[in-house]
Amino acid sequence: MPRKSFHRQEKAPLNKALNLSAPTSPRQTEEPLPEKSELGLSFAEMIDIGGRPSNQDALASAIENNLACFVVSDGVGGHVGGEIASKLITETIVHQFRQELIFSPRALQSYVAVAAMELEERKKSEARLKEMSATVAVILIDAANASALWAHLGDTRVYHFRSDKILSVTKDHSLVQQLVDAGYCTPNQLNTHPQRSVLYAALGMDSEMSESKEVSMGMSAIEVDDSFLICSDGFWEWLSEKDLESTLQTTDTMHNWLNKMRDIVLKNAKQSRSQDNYTALAIRCIEKLVP
């Protein structure tokens, strides 16, 4: 709704002799300035334990002025402390963002690097946590300059949609993704391959490959009605690209979009003996009117 404006009317001057027959100036009024638009954000989040005894997924977000930060992390299964690792990573990245409020590839790398250092310190302080690690996916958005940056490590994904179609998706740091790249598997097998959860890189993972693997990054200009989805593998593994797009095309809010996708996840996951934790964070770029 346009902001109400109040304007003072300038009185017509009287001549010094109070000659009432003298012409007077017409009253002048100020016309309200036309409204302008700028980029705004609407978002919703979802996190669920699924069929597991504990939840190793975590998410966090922060919006400060025209800058926003959204993070999802998933503790790597099979090791103690996955839930500690994912929570530490998400909280540290958002904390660093709030402290610095910088939007740049170098800043994003530093936010993730600080989280990695905090994770290593925690592992050293508690012997039982020495094997813990977690994936990470982060989006930074600069609404004033209509730009987005993202970084990820592991198989937590970032999807970018335009005109309700997938514009880009991050590439997993997983064994099956390597098989796809080498031509031994089809892209469709990323969701169904029995070894789809085997990772070769994550924050805190100790292996020759993970130590040499840098965080993957991407960037893009953004437009009104662009959407982003950050989600753990427990969410995307039950959804086809067609599912992602069709649910987005028939929804009016990010909350409804997540609910529609969750319905599909729960329906398809019935075949699973133990459904994984699942987490999703949906973001929509909207037009915001300003006076």
Image (cartoon, helix red, strand yellow):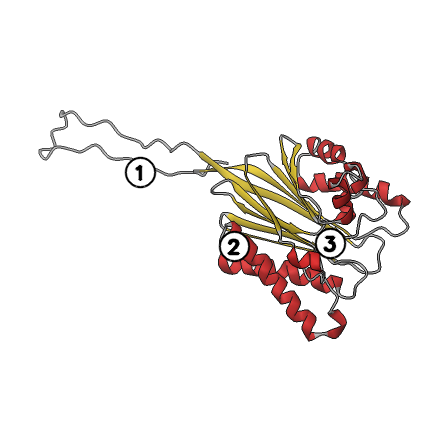
Q: Are marks 2 and 3 in contact (CB under 8 Å)?
A: no
SS category of the residue bearing label 1: loop
Left or right for 64, reference 233? left
* Residue identifier under label 1: 8
Foreground: disc 1 or disc 2 = 2
Residue 13 position in % (x across, y down): 18, 33
Res 18 → quadrant: top left
Please name the amino acid that badge 3 sits on: Tyr
Left-right relation of 46 to 109? right
Q: Position of residue 176 (x, y in %)?
A: 78, 45
**Figure quadrant of the C terminus:** top left
Which residue matches tag 2?
Answer: 107
> Marks 2/3: CA distance?
25 Å
Q: Amino acid at mark 1?
A: Arg
Element type at mark 3: loop
Residue found at x 31% / y 38%: 8
Q: Is residue 288 above or below residue 47?
A: above
In this figure, which residue is indicated by the disc labeled 3?
200
Residue type marked 2: Ala
- Which of the pair 187/271 is nearer the observer? 187
Tally the numbered discs.
Answer: 3
Q: In the image, which is nearer the foreground, mark 3 or mark 1?
A: 3
* N-terminal label among 2 and 3: 2
Label 1 Cα neighbours within 10 Å, binned few <14 / some 14-19 / many ≥20: few
Whole-percent x and y of residue 98?
A: 53, 58
Whether residue 68 is situated above or below residue 16 in the rendered picture:
below
The quadrant holding residue 200 is bottom right
Q: Position of residue 220 (x, y in %)?
A: 55, 39
Name which quarter of the figure residue 136 lies in: bottom right
